[in-house]
Structure formats: C-alpha cells, structure tokens
Image: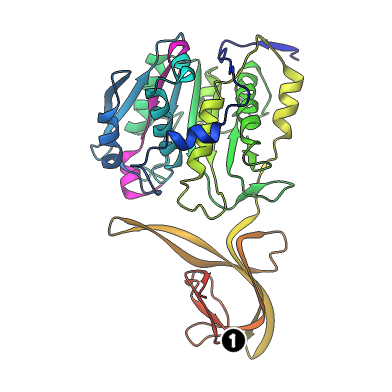
Amino acid sequence: MFTNVKLKLFTFVNQNKTMDYLQLATQYLELKLKGKYIYLDTILPLLNSLNSDFEITQIGKSVQGRTIHQVKIGTGTTKILMWSQMHGNESTTTKGLFDFFNFLKSNNGIANRIKSDYTLLCIPMLNPDGAFLYTRENANKVDLNRDAFNATQPEMQILHSVYKSFQPDYCYNLHDQRTIFGTEGFNLPATVSFLSPAYNEEREYNEVRLKAIHIINNMNNALQLYIPNQVGRFDDSYNVNCTGDYFTTQNTPTILFEAGHYKDDYNRDIVRKFIFISLLSSFDGSYENVIVDKELNNYLKIPQNNKCFYDFIYKNVKIIDNNEEKIINFAAQYTEVVQDGQLKFVATIVKIDHLQDFKGHLEYDCANGLFESKGEYFPKIEDKADFFINNLTEFNNGVKII
C-alpha cells in the first residue's frame, strides 16, 4: 500500500553516533524524585525551579481541586504533546520527564537543537488526585485512559482542550506497566514497551501509524544497546475510548510508552533512565523518505508483550492437603499500598499451579521441603507470602530470610 512516507518530524541529526545515552541519563537525573509515590506536592518545587526557557501554566483542576500544569519549552515548528501520570500510580515516566527537563535546561548542544527545532508541551501529571491516592483511576474512580472518546472527566476534558488548541504533530502517551510482562520468545522482563495505536478495528497501518512506528524503531535501536531483548511491543487491540487510539483516529501520530520492570528495580529508579533514553533518542533521526516495508517489518520484529512473569515463584514445595502429601509450585505478587505516606510492597500468594509457562523475577527451589504457615501446611490464595519451609527456612514478604 505504501512505498515511502514523507516525514515532517525528527530532522534532528545526532552528530555523535557513539553518544552515551545512559551517561546523559545519569548526569541529568533529578535527585529529588525517587521511588514510585510521586504526587503533586512532590513535583511543585521542581516546576517552580525550571528556568526561563520553560513556560509553566495552570491549565485546570482535577475532581478534588488539585491543579494541573503544562510545561512548554522550545520555539520550533514541529509540535509534540506529552502527558504523564494519566494513571495516578504510574510515575516512572514522570521521573523520566523531569530528568529530560534537566537535560533541556542545560547548554548541551543537542538540547539547544531540540529547543530550536521543536515546541514541546508536557503535562507532567494529568491525574493528580490518582497520584495522591496512588490509584490508577481518578477521584471519581474512572480510568481516564478509557474516557478519551466521551471525555466525561475534567482531567480528560483538559487534555482534549490542550490537544485542540495546541494542534500537535505528534503525541507521547506516557505510562507504566506491571511486572508481569515479558518479551515474547525471550522471556526477559519487558523493561520498556511501545505501541503505535490502531485507528480502526482491523488494526490496519496507515501513514499516521507509520510515522509513529518510525520513531519507535529509533527508540528501540537506542535501547537495544542497554537492555537487549527487553523492549516489547504492546497489544494494539482497538478501543476508541483509549487515548492513543482516539488521537490516532484524529490523524495525529501517537506513541504509547510503557515503563516496565528491570531486575531488582521495583522503585523504577533505573527504568526511569531508559525512559530518558527513549525520549532523547526519539529526536535522533536523519531522513526524508522512509521505506515503509522496512520500517513496518522492523517494528513487527519487536517482540510482543507477554504475560509470563510473577514477582516470586516457589518450586518443589511439599504440602499436606486432606492428609495427602503433594509437591506443588506457587507464585506470589507484590501489591503496592500507601501507608502513612510511604509506599509499601506487600507480597501475597496469587497462583498455585505447575507454572511451567511462567518465570519469577525471583525463584526459589524448595527441594520438596514442607510448607507451613500459621499451623497450616498448604498456601492459600490472597494470604501474605509469610511462611516456613521445613520449619527452618523463613520467607517474609516473599523473600527468603538468610
């Protein structure tokens, strides 16, 4: 259907092909943002500290009256709209965005080139109520990423208003994904995933999707240097109520970013660096004509996200059920809860099965040792992962106590 597509965006050329993205991500790390519990009061001092290159505007309020801000930077003709924390408990991309702001504040030649060639309009926290409550939904318990078409919620109405007035050439939809996702065929954690959303039920590819795909391929190429085979391709099932699908139907190339799991990085203070790399490398390209067949083929080579992980898997566990001894495997998963203003990771038992098609981010071979918890000799779904093996080896909150 297509042989080549003329692209307006991303004429920025990286003069130094050996540029160390990870070094830059570390250099410009915003040290005042750590952990996953990031809410409005956390970012307000940082917004106030941005220099005169940035234009900060209050663009509306949430259901509970919290202020929503936009950050505008750059004077270029190509316009990019970005928003983060549409889901309040998905904060990794917000941290990556502020790291990117630090880079743009600098006198780095690449940063100056971006500011001269592009105008960026960023909403660092679209759902401040959900961020404070640490929930996916807004204060009305509505998933904003299922409200794009109807726009019943004030936060989505604000995004619609910004979109209509700014008229972006591209949109970046910034999210987190759960630790359950891996890369199909590799069974490694999907540390970052991308999607060029569909515009129809048939999930056909048009010029709008292909423009987004080209940028995704650039970002994937950069990330492969640091997290090989840990970049995934998100499911493209069509739902016009999803924000990316909706804006794609409006003929705006849109990219879904999903920050995922990296080994031992449950606070995602390493993954944020890969989001920074993604953002920076999205501006790294030199082309007039894109060979569509090659671009699409490269995009489809990115492994799909696959639900293949649990946080913990315990293998070869002896249980006693109705006076019968059995050997089983079971899995536990962290639930994230805010207690006394602090985010806690609570491991609970979620699956008892063979689990041959799953991996654990942490796995234990219990060597046919006997399970015991609170006087019972078999695990129960939804119980906390606190137990003993052979009455000697203790597991607390999922982890073996040494």
Which amino acid lies under the numbered mark 1 shown in the image of this protein? Asn
What's the residue at 48%, 65% (across, down)?
Answer: 347
Question: Residue 39, image x and y in percent?
Answer: 32, 43
Question: Residue 24, image x and y in percent?
Answer: 49, 32
What's the residue at 47%, 69% (across, down)?
Answer: 397
Locate residue 13 relative to residue 136 in the image: left or right.
right
Quadrant in the picture for residue 331:
bottom right
Foreground: 217 or 248? 217
Question: Residue 292, image x and y in percent?
Answer: 73, 18
Quadrant in the picture for residue 343:
bottom left
Q: Is residue 329 above or below residue 170?
A: below
Q: In this figure, what is the number of numbered marks?
A: 1
Q: Is residue 199 visible?
A: yes
- Location of the N terminus by quadrant is top right
Locate residue 60 relative to residue 149 in the image: left or right.
left
Foreground: 220 or 376? 220
Asked if residue 123 is among those painted magenta in the image, a careful observer would answer yes
Quadrant in the picture for residue 200:
top right
Q: Which element is circle 1 on?
A: loop
Farthest residue, direction bottom? 323
Question: Residue 390, image x and y in percent?
Answer: 59, 86
Farthest residue, direction left? 65
Q: Is residue 303 above or below residue 245?
A: below
Numbered range of the magenta stretch: 115-135
Q: Which residue is mark 1?
A: 390
The structure's colour scheme is rainbow
Q: Is residue 237 visible?
A: no
Locate residue 59 relative to residue 186 in the image: left or right.
left
